[in-house]
Image: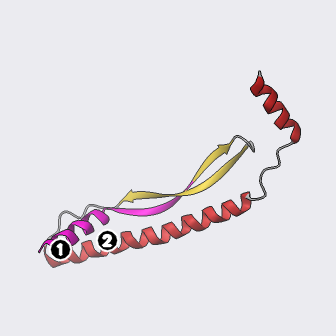
Amino acid sequence: MRIALLTVLALCTLSACIFVPKEVQYFDERCQITMRKHVLSHEEMGYLGGCSDKACAVLMAGAGIVSAASLVVSGTIVMTQNTLTWLEQQDGCKVPENSDSELQTAQNT
């Protein structure tokens, strides 16, 4: 009985959200450019509290499967996009040498 209760509780918790990849932009001070990265974000799904009987159990199980699948798919997308971005950045930024000396002079004053 406890296992069934814990399973239902876990499905209720899992079925409350879905995971989506989002792009975040930030400014890189060293290169003086706007960079991007991808992160996982969660969105709330509809409320499933108004049902009963076996139909409700099937609905909750389906929502739990959708939630888990969205985590796997979105997580894979985020990892792939961030890996590609990292590979693009391996060239590094082309910081002019005079800007390094200007930066050091500005920091010393």
Query: At 86% across and 42% down in the image, what residue appears?
Result: 96
Residue located beneath label 2 in the image:
64
Identity of the residue furthest to the top in this view: 109
Q: Is 55 on the left-hand or right-hand side of 36?
A: left
- Residue 18 image position (x, y, % from top left): 39, 64
Residue located beneath label 1 in the image:
3
Q: Mark 2 and 1 residues: CB-CB less than 8 Å, in contact? A: no
Q: What amino acid is found at the position of numbered circle 2 in the picture?
A: Gly
Above or below for 14 versus 96: below
Q: CA distance from mark 2 to mark 1?
A: 16 Å
Query: At 78% across and 58% down in the image, what residue appears?
Result: 91
Identity of the residue furthest to the left in this view: 1
Label 2 CA crowd tier, 10 Å (few <14, some 14–19, many 20+): many
Query: At 34% across and 61% down in the image, what residue appears?
Result: 45
Q: How is the image coloured?
A: secondary structure
Q: What amino acid is found at the position of numbered circle 1 in the picture?
A: Ile
Mark 1: secondary structure: helix
- Residue 93 image position (x, y, % from top left): 78, 50
Asked whether residue 32 is drawn in magenta, I would say no
Mark 2: secondary structure: helix
- Residue 100 image position (x, y, % from top left): 82, 37
Q: Number of numbered discs present?
A: 2
- Residue 88 image position (x, y, % from top left): 73, 61
- Which of the 4 image quadrants contains residue 67? bottom left
Query: At 25% across and 67% down in the image, what residue appears?
Result: 10
Q: Is 2 on the left-hand or right-hand side of 36?
A: left
Of callouts 2 and 1, the N-terminal one:
1
Above or below for 99 versus 87: above
For the record, the magenta segment spans 1-23
Above or below for 79 versus 89: below
Q: Is 11 on the left-hand or right-hand side of 95?
A: left
